[in-house]
Amino acid sequence: MATETTTTELTDGFHLVVDALKLNGIDTIYGLVGIPITDLARLWQAEGGRFIGFRHEQHAGNAAAIAGYLTQKPGICLTVSAPGFLNGLTALANATTNCFPMILISGSSEREIVDLQQGDYEEMDQLNAARPYAKAAYRVLHAEDIGIGVARAIRAAVSGRPGGVYLDLPAKLLAQAIDAERGRQSLVKVVDPAPRQIPAADAVARALDVLKGAKRPLILLGKGAAYAQADAAIRALVEKSGIPYLPMSMAKGLLPDDHAQSASAARSYVLAEADVVMLVGARLNWLLSHGKGKTWGAPVPKRFIQVDIAPTEIDSNVAIAAPVIGDIGSCVEALVAGIGAGFPKPDAQWLGAIAERKAKNAAKMAETLAKDPVPMNFHSALRAIRDVLAPRPDIYVVNEGANTLDFARSIIDMREPRKRLDSGTWGIMGIGMGFAIGASVTTGKQVVAIEGDSAFGFSGMEVETICRYNLPVCIVVFNNNGVYRGTDVNPTGGKDVAPTVFVKGARYDRMMEAFGGIGRNAATPAELTAALNEAIASGRPTLINAVIDEAAGTESGRIGNLNPQSAAKKK
Ligand code: ADP
Ligand code: TZD
């Protein structure tokens, strides 16, 4: 029977998904097509959306996640059912772990068959598989619920602590036809998806009191602070208070790394000696030795102030004297407002001691960097890259590996916020090409991906994607013939190489040439400099195979202490 809103025009699940995403300002989908979502991708493109197709879903997911981190809008990854979904799930879990907002949308098989385990094409209970790795997981069964489903997914991804969200779209839903007007009315434009969360006045006052009592205060900036895009407020907090600060890896550049108050070059000293530490968007996880032990100069008692949007983060590892719960912009603005002219400046002796350590460590590093060994080592290669990047703070740096990650983090200074994108909270390998593509597609800017040869291998096939979309991405592979290094030998003398060893003298540059990009082999810092300059000047897809001494790396880079020692080795 005809109702007031009924028209003869019909719409379906495919159109409603596209309309719901577009209505909420989503312009790009990263994904990989197949049954049942190929037509969804086609329609998305036909309706003016950008579809970036990948060679493996994990990298599409990583691109979506980093787009979310850079824009504060959820990055969208689209996959097929079961295996495609599972390939994307690693990226979803990594996004949740790192607090990046993304939505994994996967097509799925028929519910009735899946639930009775009758063996459908790519059968899997995806919703339940996603749940433990996602901030939220939803399934839509009726076309008129697509609008609400997409709205819930967007809000869950970006509000509060951001994270990964799973949205399950059964094949049947996509083909479901409903009245077009009813469909239009079912769409939801999310109002204020990530509302500001204002900190309580007494929490701010308590934090300022703790700070006032400090003799040796320290501010620790994490990637939550970078994500928040409260750059001016954070700078004001640091500069008005005069407190030295340390950026976590992805917070580098929030203030320029050559800022006078940066204590990066005196990291161990300030962590051990500070008496009050203010964490801003940083968690006391393994990357900060859980806030205790030798790193923190135990048994010296520390007092922590923690600014975070997630109340359950507080006291997760050690007692927090002054929690400030809210979005970083609002919290930091409130703190800055409380730092008046009479606010005590940090002790001059403290600042002097830090300056002294910094100078000493910087001199030591300069000496190491001045050497020109043949073949190149990590330092001489990174010196070359550092010097090319110095006048170009707008370039995005993607970085993964073990030694390649640890050395690049300390040698390559960042001068603008959110320009360093790396292995993050898990120390995961495989984010390289996904992050590079996501950053480049989102911003249109040049990306330089500094990759261990093992790290690169996880996503290496995406060089085709980089060439296909002609992205300004230059990959530098630090080729030392293996995982960490290339010198291990099989103790049995058998024909298999050692577990850490790759093909020697591989030419990764030729992978890029295979798809029409530029490949360069660089055996010296001068060759590396020339190739990188050429890549940046041309903006063309480029891969530089940087030949690094195979004996240069240390096992696990700087986290070798986390390797369990075998009883036999200990003896
Ligand atoms: P890092 O690895 O750089 O130390 P983490 O990923 O451990 O950083 O910590 C980021 C923290 O920032 C998380 O605890 C998260 O809840 C918080 N966070 C993310 N976005 C915001 C925001 N907009 N406002 C406040 N806190 C935020
Ligand atoms: N698999 C995944 C998904 N993540 C990981 N972190 C690892 C395996 C273990 N791993 C590291 O932690 S670093 C690394 C692996 C395999 C690669 C190190 O070798 P590399 O870098 O060639 O990338 P360097 O610079 O030569 O050390």
Image (spheres, rainbow, N blue to C red):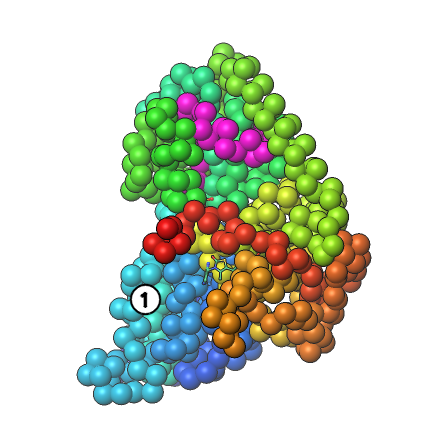
> Residue at point 40% right, 33% down?
294
Kind of residue sitting beneath label 1: Ala
Q: Secondary structure under badge 1?
A: helix
Image coordinates of residue 258 in percent, x first then y, are 65, 34
In the rendered view, tell whether residue 12 sits above or below residue 439.
below
Image coordinates of residue 260 in percent, x first then y, are 63, 27
**Magenta stretch containing residue 281, yes or no?**
yes
Look at the numbered disc 1 and say if its residue's Cβ is closer than 8 Å to ligand 2.
no
Q: Write the start and end of the magenta stretch as one range.
A: 261-283
> Residue at point 52% right, 24% down?
243
Quarter of the figure with residue 323: top left
Q: Badge 1 is on which residue?
A: 130
Image coordinates of residue 309 in percent, x first then y, are 37, 41
> Residue at point 68% right, 32% down?
363
Q: In this rendering, does residue 459 appear at all?
A: no
Residue extending farthest top:
342
In the rendered view, tell whether residue 152 sits above or below residue 194.
below
Q: Residues within 10 Å of mark 1 (few under 14, many from 20)?
A: many
Q: In this rendering, does residue 407 appear at all?
A: yes
